[in-house]
Amino acid sequence: MDLSLRSIDQVKVGSLAGSLGFLLRLAQLRAFEDFFSDRGPRDLKPGEFSVLWVIACNPGIRQSALGQRLMIKRAHMTKLVRVLEEQGFVSRRIPDADRRAVELTLTEAGRDAVETAAAAFFAYEETTGAPLSKGEQAQLIALLQRYVGLEEDTCR
């Protein structure tokens, strides 16, 4: 019996097809593959854009709160903020009341970068869920927001 598999449709994944973690991983990989294709925005990586966007929505946010909300490890957050600061997008301030804290705000260049990237990022977001109907996309987004403990908010 010939067991060689010649197409992706022939590959069985068994019980993994019902595994939330496995499906979320594949969904993330598909989204990133699509993002980094010719159709995706060019200016910033998804993580960089997310960090800048959240800082724009929360001027003066503490770096630790930002990292916790975006689930970015402390060491990675420090490196990312350092890179964004070197690019002239973010400024850091250490408050007098708590010398251990770091507060982040966007510079003028950072605000411009977010504004430019947002148009491309959110236009791309309109097409990334193409295999799903608009209703299915809304349902998936609502379920994922609930799963990760996020509510839709008004920053835009």
Image (tube, grey):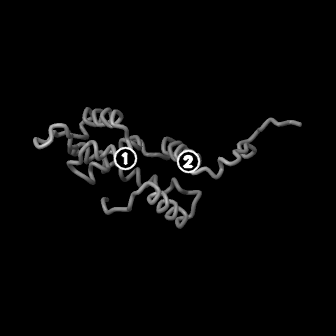
Q: CA distance from mark 2 to mark 1?
A: 18 Å
Quarter of the figure with the N terminus: top right
Identify which residue is drawn at 57% across, 45% down.
26
Residue 90 x %, y %: 24, 40
| Residue position marked by numbered label 1 in the rendering | 70
- Closer to the chain start, of discs 2 and 1, is 2
| Residue position marked by numbered label 2 in the rendering | 21
Quarter of the figure with the C terminus: bottom left
- The type of residue carrying mark 2 is Gly
Looking at the rendered structure, the secondary structure element under dot 1 is: helix
Identify which residue is drawn at 29% across, 37% down.
81
107, above or below 156, in the image: above
Residue 107 x %, y %: 21, 43
Q: Is residue 102 left or right of residue 38?
A: left
* Quadrant in the rendering for residue 110: top left
Residue 106 x %, y %: 23, 45
Residue 144 x %, y %: 48, 57
- Say if mark 2 contacts mark 1, CB within 8 Å: no
Label 1 crowding class (10 Å Cα cut-off): few <14, some 14-19, many 20+? Answer: few
- The type of residue carrying mark 1 is Leu
Label 2 crowding class (10 Å Cα cut-off): few <14, some 14-19, many 20+? Answer: few
Identify which residue is drawn at 27% across, 48% down.
55
In this view, the residue farthest toward the left is 96
Q: Is residue 41 left or right of residue 137?
A: left
95, above or below 83, in the image: below
In front: 130, or 58?
A: 58
In front: 102, or 124?
A: 102
